[in-house]
Image (tube, rainbow, N blue to C red):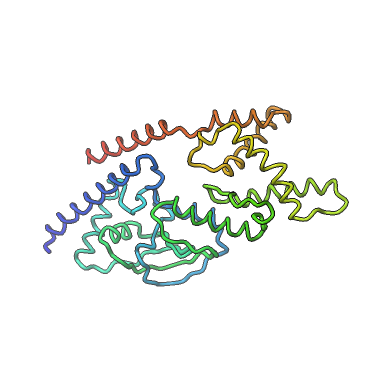
């Protein structure tokens, strides 16, 4: 293919992926977070890898590359370029593919069986756009016990992490058998550690008045009956879950306890749980109309910017 033909084809390729990025954004109008490329740092904060090990050169399946270390704002969750300023670099790589030029290996981090780009985001973007199955990569592995399945959004990865955390928590504490409650569920990662710390704190204060230290089993049951369920029952009685439709009652428990503690520190220890629940619902209810309005504005501005290029 002549250079002129290659250039024309590359221009068309870039226009196609930019249009796909816009369509992807419109298709997720009510859930814009699903179109964000996953940040390696966000995953590291949830998984806390033990250490990193240099693995070396590998051939990596492109569909297992799900995010980026530093360029997650430049590409969407499908690695389509989100901004026109990425065009020149993207075009040069696309042309190289058409000419059969061997490109340098990308640099990746591996964690839980999926990969994040350290260097070579444009190369990965072009490879995905062209349906390339595998790519040469220099890999460093971040060690963790969890194994992840490639997902197209942060939400799909978070669900896997939460399920893993739940299995660990229930196995470690025997919580389900002790309380009869198997519905301790969350929509954000790291909350089972919060619950475990709540139980340990509760156990500590009980033991201040005990001659013999109570068992972990008794502490869990006491916390469940005297701390957790009273807050949950108050949440249910005030019917505030309808204002947090994408959340669980366990989510609300964690947030409310923290919020209530802050209110008591600021306004006095006699600030009631009922008042805290009402205040929390009024100030933090998830407003769907506002979310739609803000996202429509962003999409509109993006479309204007694209048309001007």
Total marks shown come to: 0
Viewer-closest of 291 and 121: 291
Left or right: 250 as drawn, with respect to 66: right
Left or right: 1 as drawn, with respect to 60: left
Q: Quick one: which residue is furthest to the right in this view? A: 211
The percent coordinates of residue 241 (x first, y second) are: 54, 36
Residue at 40% from the left image edge and 68% from the top image edge: 138
Q: Quadrant of residue 114?
A: bottom left
Residue at 35% from the left image edge and 60% from the top image edge: 120
Q: Quick one: which residue is furthest to the front in this view? A: 180
Asked if 109 appears above or below 199 in the picture, the reply is: below
The percent coordinates of residue 306 (x first, y second) are: 25, 41
The percent coordinates of residue 102 (x first, y second) are: 27, 69
Left or right: 80 as drawn, with respect to 274: left
Asked if 134 appears above or below 220 in the picture, the reply is: below
Left or right: 214 as drawn, with respect to 90: right
Q: Quadrant of residue 32?
A: top left
Residue at 64% from the left image edge and 28% from the top image edge: 275
Residue at 24% from the left image edge and 47% from the top image edge: 19
The percent coordinates of residue 267 (x first, y second) are: 69, 27
Viewer-closest of 118 and 21: 21
Q: Quadrant of the N terminus?
A: bottom left
């Amino acid at each position: 293919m002549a250079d002129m033909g290659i250039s024309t084809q590359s221009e068309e390729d870039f226009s196609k992926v930019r249009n796909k990025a816009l369509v992807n954004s419109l298709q997720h109008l009510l859930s814009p977070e699903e179109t964000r490329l996953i940040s390696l740092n966000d995953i590291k904060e949830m998984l806390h890898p033990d250490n990193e090990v240099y693995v070396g050169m590998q051939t990596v399946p492109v569909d297992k590359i799900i995010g980026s270390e530093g360029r997650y704002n430049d590409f969407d969750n499908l690695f389509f370029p989100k901004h026109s300023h990425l065009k020149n670099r993207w075009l040069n790589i696309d042309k190289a593919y058409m000419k059969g030029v061997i490109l340098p290996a990308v640099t990746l981090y591996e964690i839980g069986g999926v990969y994040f780009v350290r260097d070579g985001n444009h190369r990965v973007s072009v490879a995905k756009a062209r349906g390339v199955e595998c790519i040469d990569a220099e890999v460093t592995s971040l060690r963790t016990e969890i194994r992840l399945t490639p997902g197209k959004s942060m939400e799909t990865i978070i669900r896997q992490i939460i399920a893993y955390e739940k299995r660990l928590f229930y196995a470690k504490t025997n919580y389900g058998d002790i309380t009869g409650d198997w519905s301790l569920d969350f929509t954000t990662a790291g909350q089972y550690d919060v619950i475990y710390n709540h139980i340990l704190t509760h156990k500590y204060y009980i033991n201040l008045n005990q001659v013999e230290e109570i068992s972990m089993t008794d502490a869990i049951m006491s916390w469940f009956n005297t701390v957790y369920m009273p807050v949950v029952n108050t949440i249910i009685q005030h019917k505030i879950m309808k204002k947090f439709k994408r959340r669980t009652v366990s989510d609300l428990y964690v947030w409310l306890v923290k919020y209530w503690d802050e209110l008591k520190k600021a306004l006095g220890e006699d600030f009631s749980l009922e008042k805290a629940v009402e205040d929390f619902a009024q100030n933090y209810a998830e407003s769907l109309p506002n979310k739609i309005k803000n996202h429509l504005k962003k999409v509109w501005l993006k479309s204007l910017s694209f048309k001007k290029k």
